[in-house]
């Protein structure tokens, strides 16, 4: 028999046969008594249930009667996150215990707290075990503990938060309810009791991301509240590289303001000012003679419903600019991440002129609204050659939302994909064009000049310490053309990959007239460098292009290469500015893009809405 107060309900399964009101209820061996309450308790032990069970023990030949009186208490407890990604932590979302991609997906977003709130003696906030400033909480994700029930829990009951050792190495939890925001969960503290406030109450916690997704981490972290289901699960935000319009151009100048660098610097300043952006110059005491700003770092960003900020990815190349990303860029709402490789594994292909991103594309029905990462590697079937180091490749692949494409770049002496390709905006078709360096287009242009009687027009005319060469001389060297035929075959291989992986047609590609030459290295390997300044190695600032000045043959007082470039680009509504980088960069095997870097606006599309 069962008796209970009015706000306690019970049921028995399976349902017993009916009896009179006062008669005992017959049970079978599998009977279960289910107890529930219609509302939360107002105070401890405010509800009661009494059951009396007669259990006949036939083996011993006598009966035993058990009567028990239970104090019943109901407390509503939920551990909540922003599971629907609208920057509001709703109560008890049924999807908070799982994570799903897509515009109709669910699961919270967790930023990696890789910026630094301190401007001096700084290090990434994620390496601290305390909240240095209230502003740091913006870089964390809110988790709310909601309770509704009696003033205190029944004796012996407590609330405990806990996290696995593996997840604790990727995320930490701070308590906002207590002064100074004490650390609740970390790799040193995997479980901790949290106070039960009583009545109707909310307690805010802040979850801090420590790691980006990587080969050994899918980005998911689970935080548990004992005796409560479901588990709240969040995903660590992904690192994203953007191709959107810039917010700032960051240029590394030479160690001294010499006359050869003056022309380059002047051209860059004019271009950036014309485009309406800001120019930041990395001065001598910082760059220490390292002019390759593009190679040392890559700008990206992380995003969540409540916060977004830029992040610099530091290359393992570690030239003389190795301290620049950490010392000069890491700061409040500007994050930092790097991947450390064994020095023996690092090659020129680990410089980030070898890391680019495409515009948004759709390929065979699959949408890439954030574009696709592009990297350069050795030829797929090669038994030896240079590759981007594995730790960097693993990191890029683990971000998932910008699925990488591997291109063949080891045929180049420097080995960077920005030496033979780039993207520019376009008003039609897919919204962009792929520009490819093309020796075939170069020979076609020079043969046309020769046919029109300009065979004696000279390249490099007027350049100090540079021997001019005529169009006729270029066309007369069979071995030089054979070198360019080889280069063209390498670019054509990449052309096919890019068409397939980006869903491009021939009309989406523009060939630029650029010739190369082969240089022999110490290991007797022949690799290519641009014969004259490589016009595809440009900086793109919206509709304004900063292009290496090619110093090509002049026809009627105008450089034929510049004229051809303007003809190809102006049809897309783009403006060409030619920058003299011959002495300061080209002679050192780099160009405008290699010596500059651009912090760009994030994509409008939210990465967690991607259908995976």
Image (spheres, rainbow, N blue to C red):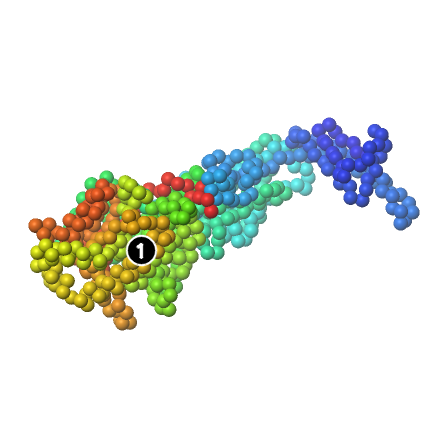
Task: Identify the image quadrant of residue 277.
Answer: top left
Task: Answer left or right for 34 relative to 508.
Answer: right
Which quadrant: the N terminus? Answer: top right
Q: Nearer the viewer, residue 98 or 203?
A: 98
Q: Position of residue 537 (x, y in %)?
A: 24, 53
Q: Secondary structure at mark 1?
A: helix
Task: Answer left or right for 138 relative to 144.
Answer: left
Residue shown at the point (28%, 61%) measured from the top left: 489
Residue under numbered circle 1: 495
Residue 590 in the image: above or below residue 220: below
Q: Position of residue 26 (x, y in %)?
A: 83, 38
Q: Nearer the viewer, residue 386 or 352?
A: 386
Q: Position of residue 490 (x, y in %)?
A: 29, 61
Categorize mark 1 by other alpha carbons within 10 Å: few (<14), some (14-19), many (20+): some
Residue shown at the point (33%, 42%) measured from the top left: 601
Q: Nearer the viewer, residue 461 or 41?
A: 461
Residue shown at the point (18%, 58%) measured from the top left: 443
Determine if residue 336 is in view: no
Determine if residue 531 is in view: yes
Residue 524 in the image: above or below residue 77: below
Image label count: 1
Q: Farthest residue toward the front?
A: 451
Residue shown at the point (7%, 50%) measured from the top left: 556
Q: Farthest residue toward the top?
A: 6
Q: Position of residue 423 (x, y in %)?
A: 29, 48
Task: Answer left or right for 22 relative to 555.
Answer: right
Task: Identify the image quadrant of residue 3.
Answer: top right
């Amino acid at each position: 028999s069962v008796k209970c107060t009015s706000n306690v309900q019970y049921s028995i399964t399976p349902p017993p046969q009916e009896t009179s009101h006062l008669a005992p209820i017959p049970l079978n061996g599998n009977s279960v008594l289910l107890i529930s309450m219609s509302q939360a308790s107002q105070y401890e032990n405010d509800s009661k249930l009494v059951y009396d069970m007669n259990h006949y023990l036939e083996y011993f030949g006598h009966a035993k009667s058990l009567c028990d009186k239970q104090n019943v208490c109901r407390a509503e407890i939920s551990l909540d996150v922003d599971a629907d990604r609208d920057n509001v932590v709703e109560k008890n979302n049924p999807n908070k215990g799982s994570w799903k991609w897509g515009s109709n997906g669910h699961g919270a977003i967790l930023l990696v707290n890789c910026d630094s709130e301190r401007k001096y003696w700084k290090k990434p906030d994620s390496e601290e075990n305390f909240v240095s400033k209230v502003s740091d909480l913006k870089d964390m994700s809110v988790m709310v503990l909601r309770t509704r029930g009696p003033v205190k829990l029944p004796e012996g009951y407590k609330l405990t938060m806990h996290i696995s050792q593996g997840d604790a190495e990727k995320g930490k939890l701070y308590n906002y309810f207590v002064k100074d925001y004490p650390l609740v969960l970390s790799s040193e503290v995997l479980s901790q009791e949290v106070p039960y406030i009583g009545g109707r109450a909310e307690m805010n916690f802040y979850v801090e991301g420590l790691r980006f997704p990587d080969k050994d981490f899918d980005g998911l972290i689970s935080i548990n509240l004992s005796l409560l289901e479901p588990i709240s699960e969040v995903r660590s935000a992904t690192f994203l590289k953007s191709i959107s319009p810039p917010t700032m151009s960051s240029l590394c100048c030479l160690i001294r303001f010499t006359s050869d660098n003056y022309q380059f610097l002047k051209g860059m300043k004019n271009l950036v000012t014309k485009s309406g952006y800001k120019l930041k110059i990395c001065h001598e005491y910082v760059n220490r003679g390292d002019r390759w700003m593009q190679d040392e770092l890559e700008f990206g960003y992380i995003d969540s419903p409540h916060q977004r900020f830029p992040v610099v990815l530091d290359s393992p190349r570690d030239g003389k600019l190795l301290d620049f990303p950490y010392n000069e860029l890491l700061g409040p709402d500007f994050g930092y991440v790097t991947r450390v490789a064994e020095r023996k594994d690092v090659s020129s292909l680990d410089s980030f002129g070898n890391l680019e991103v495409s515009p948004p594309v759709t390929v065979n029905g699959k949408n890439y609204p954030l574009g696709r990462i592009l990297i350069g590697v050795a030829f797929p079937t090669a038994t030896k050659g240079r590759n981007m180091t594995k730790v960097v490749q693993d990191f890029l692949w683990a971000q998932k939302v910008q699925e990488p494409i591997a291109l063949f770049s080891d045929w180049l002496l420097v080995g960077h994909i920005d030496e033979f390709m780039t993207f520019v905006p376009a008003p039609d078709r897919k919204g962009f064009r792929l520009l490819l360096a093309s020796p075939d287009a170069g020979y076609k242009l020079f043969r046309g000049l020769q046919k029109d009687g300009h065979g004696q027009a000279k390249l490099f005319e007027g350049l100090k310490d540079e021997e001019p060469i005529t169009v006729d001389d270029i066309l007369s060297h069979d071995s030089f053309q054979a070198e360019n035929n080889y280069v063209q075959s390498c670019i054509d291989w990449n052309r096919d990959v890019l068409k397939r992986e980006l869903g491009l047609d021939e009309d989406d590609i523009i060939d630029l007239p650029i010739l190369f030459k082969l240089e022999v290295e110490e290991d007797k390997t022949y690799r290519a460098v641009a014969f004259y300044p490589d016009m595809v190695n440009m900086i793109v600032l919206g509709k304004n292009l900063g292009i290496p000045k090619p110093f090509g043959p002049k026809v009627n007082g105008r450089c034929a290469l510049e004229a051809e470039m303007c003809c190809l680009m102006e049809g897309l509504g783009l403006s060409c500015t030619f920058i003299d980088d011959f002495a300061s960069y080209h002679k050192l095997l780099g160009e405008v893009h290699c010596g500059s870097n651009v912090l760009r606006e994030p994509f409008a599309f939210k990465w967690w809405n991607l259908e995976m």
